[in-house]
Structures are given as structure tokens and as C-alpha cells.
């Protein structure tokens, strides 16, 4: 054992020596391992005495809230694993998201403290610490103000994806979008342009996920495909109604019917208008420009035998420099899986948009 330990000690010393000998100034973060774990997966650290009570229930009430849609069925905002702080092992320390809620006995606070600790155990990690010396005040904070904490985590996750997409992106689409639509957009490098015309571009990103066999449900091992589509189109700006929610929805279905045919004769992509999942629209300002966001469900229409659909998120922007209305839509098709993280990816792609002329 001592020889084994000495060998790895020697490797560590050599590793550090090589870096310093190359003239690099190492920081603490440079020596940390990379964080692991899927987006949206939180390790929640709470002692049993507060986890098994009102404090634990209040925390989980917030973390279990439905994720931001659109979705055909509810999904929790986060996937949470509770761990007692003393049971957090090395593998757990490497998780991308750690949240610790604690009552402090040896210090008196004037208010509940919320600390954002980045790169605490690993690079690319967020460790949020919520603590107070007064259990009642801590409970009140969690009940009334814990949305601040969930926003910190969601923004961290979104910005992490944005950073990743800006480093590893589809350069062909990036150049095409700049030239033809007057915008810069970063979508994953494994996306492929399938249709490209003067006023419409269709990009597909296909991925596969393997599902293990389940003896209880009598399912064998299977591989499923997930598709994300990125659609861009533009029209001359002629009327303010083009930047209203109703105007955007009318234009959307006209464009989809013409450009996105289904596999069955007469079928095409459309927007689901059922009252239970009616699209949610928002008028806002993006990059100092008038914009409309639509979050909804797409479906196949035009043929009763056509089926399939999923969530979409869409930005419609007024490009003043070109006097055009530019729309970017990201849709998801993954019927065998929850959509939370695919929707987060869609939001991140749209948030990379910038006007270039």
C-alpha cells in the first residue's frame, strides 16, 4: 500500500512540476477535476433532523415544482438526490450541482445567508449554500424566497450550455445565418443543415439514447432517437401586427405547412391549439429589438393517420437594420423521454442569438 501511495504521490509531484516548468501560472481551479453529472441533477445536502420535517418538505416543494414548459405532462424542475452531509463521498463531490441547506449552531446570523460557490470541489460546479442560525427564519426564507435559489441554479445551467455552444458550434449554419438572416446563432456542431433556401433554413440534430432492458415491464434493451430541429425564416417587416402573439402564430403555421411536410401524404407540421396546451406567448425586448417568444406544442396535421409531436420554443425578432422579421424556432421530438433538458437546450440555443448588421 505504501509503495502504491508513493507512486501516485510521485506522479502528482511530476504533474505539477511539468506545468510549472512550462511557465504556466496554475490556479486552484487548474488542479481540480471536471464536474460530472447531467444538467438539472442536484445533490441536496441536509441533516436528517431538518430533512425529515417542515424544512425538508419546504425545500422539496420548490425543487419539485413543474419545469418551465411547454410539455405534454408535468416534469419536476430538478432531479434531486438527498444525501446527509457526512455521507457525501468523492463521487458525490464531483456532481455539477450541490445544494446544502443547514442550521448553524456556532454562529449568530442576522438574516438567512445564500452563498454561490463555483468550482468548489470540481471545475464547472455550482455549490449553493443556504444557512441560518434561526430555524424559523430559515423556514420562512425557504417558503417565501427560495425562488431566488432555484433561479441561481437554472441560470447557471442555462449559461453553462450557452458557453458550451459558443465553443463547439455548427460553423456552416453560423455563417449562413449571418449572411442570410443578419443574426449570429450557435447551435451544436453535430447539427446538420437539411433544407436551405433564400428565406427558410431547416437544421436537424439527431441523437440516440440506449434504454436498458426492464424485466418488470417486459421491455428489452432498445435504442431510441431524439431529434431537435432548428428552423429559421424571414419576411419583410410591413406591419406591427407581425410582432403580436396572434400574428406570429398565424405566420408560423403558414410557414410550417409550406416548408415542413410529414411522411404521410398531405401531412405537415402545425401548432397544437387545444386549450389544454395552447401556446404561451410573450412580447419582450431582445438585444434592444422588439421580440415575441412562443412556447408550445407542435403536431402533425393534414392527415388523420399522422401522429407525433413535442415541445417547441420560438423567437420572432424585428431586425431593424434589414427591416425584416426573423424567426428562429427550436423543436423537440423524443416521445420516449422527458423533455426538461431538451427544452433547456432549446432556450440556450436561442439565447446565443445576436444581430450582426
Image (cartoon, grey):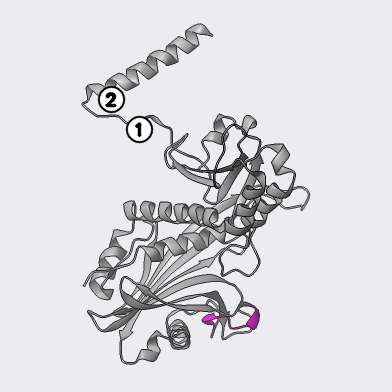
Q: Which mark is residue 176?
A: none
Disc with the residue nearer the chain's start (1 vs 2): 2
> In the rendered image, which quarter contains the N terminus?
top right
Q: Which quadrant would residue 288 be assigned to in this image?
A: bottom left
Q: Which residues are magenta?
A: 265-276
> In the rendered image, which quarter contains the C terminus?
bottom left
Q: Secondary structure at mark 1?
A: helix
Task: Kindly report which numbered mark, 1 or 2, lies closer to the viewer in this rendering.
Answer: 1
Give the spatial CA distance, label 1 vs label 2. 10 Å
Give me the residue at 72% from left, 38% from top. 49
Q: What is the number of callouts on the image?
A: 2
Q: Secondary structure at mark 2?
A: helix
Q: Which residue is mark 2?
A: 19
Mark 1 touches mark 2? (CB < 8 Å): yes
For this orientation, the residue located farthest to the top is 2
Give me the residue at 63% from left, 43% from top. 134
Quick check: is 266 in the magenta stretch?
A: yes
Position of 164 with respect to 108 (left or right) is: left
Q: Which residue is mark 1?
A: 30
Vertical placement of residue 333 versus 121, above or below: below
Amino acid at each position: 500500500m505504501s509503495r502504491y501511495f508513493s507512486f501516485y504521490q510521485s506522479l502528482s509531484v511530476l504533474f505539477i512540476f511539468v506545468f510549472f516548468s512550462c511557465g504556466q501560472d496554475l490556479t486552484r481551479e487548474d488542479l481540480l477535476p471536471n464536474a460530472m453529472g447531467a444538467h438539472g441533477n442536484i445533490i441536496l445536502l441536509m441533516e436528517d433532523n431538518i430533512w425529515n420535517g417542515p424544512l425538508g418538505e419546504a425545500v422539496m416543494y420548490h425543487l419539485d415544482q413543474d419545469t418551465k414548459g411547454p410539455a405534454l405532462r408535468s416534469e419536476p424542475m430538478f432531479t434531486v438526490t438527498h444525501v446527509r452531509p457526512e455521507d457525501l463521498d468523492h463521487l458525490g463531490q464531483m456532481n455539477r450541482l450541490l445544494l446544502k441547506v443547514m442550521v448553524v449552531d456556532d454562529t449568530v446570523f442576522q438574516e438567512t445567508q445564500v452563498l454561490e460557490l463555483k468550482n468548489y470541489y470540481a471545475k464547472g460546479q455550482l455549490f449553493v449554500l443556504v444557512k441560518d442560525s434561526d430555524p424559523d427564519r430559515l423556514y420562512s426564507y425557504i417558503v417565501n424566497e427560495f425562488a431566488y435559489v432555484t433561479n441561481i441554479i437554472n441560470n447557471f445551467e442555462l449559461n453553462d450550455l450557452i458557453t458550451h455552444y459558443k465553443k463547439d458550434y455548427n460553423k456552416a449554419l453560423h455563417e449562413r445565418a449571418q449572411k442570410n438572416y443578419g443574426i449570429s446563432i450557435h447551435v451544436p456542431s453535430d447539427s446538420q443543415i437539411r433544407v436551405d433556401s433564400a428565406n427558410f433554413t431547416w437544421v436537424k440534430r439527431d441523437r440516440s439514447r440506449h434504454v436498458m432492458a426492464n424485466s418488470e415491464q417486459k421491455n428489452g434493451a432498445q435504442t431510441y432517437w431524439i431529434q431537435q430541429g432548428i428552423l429559421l425564416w424571414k419576411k419583410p417587416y410591413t406591419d406591427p401586427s407581425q410582432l403580436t402573439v396572434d400574428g406570429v402564430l398565424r405566420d408560423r403555421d403558414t410557414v410550417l405547412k409550406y416548408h415542413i411536410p410529414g411522411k404521410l401524404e398531405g401531412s405537415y407540421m402545425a401548432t397544437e391549439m387545444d386549450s389544454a396546451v395552447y401556446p404561451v406567448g410573450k412580447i419582450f425586448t431582445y438585444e434592444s429589438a422588439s421580440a415575441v417568444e412562443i412556447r408550445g406544442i407542435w403536431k402533425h396535421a393534414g392527415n388523420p393517420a399522422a401522429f407525433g409531436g413535442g415541445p417547441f420554443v420560438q423567437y420572432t425578432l424585428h431586425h431593424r437594420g434589414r427591416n425584416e422579421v426573423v424567426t428562429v424556432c427550436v423543436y423537440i421530438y423524443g416521445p420516449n423521454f422527458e423533455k426538461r433538458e431538451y427544452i433547456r437546450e432549446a432556450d440556450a440555443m436561442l439565447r446565443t442569438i445576436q444581430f450582426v448588421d
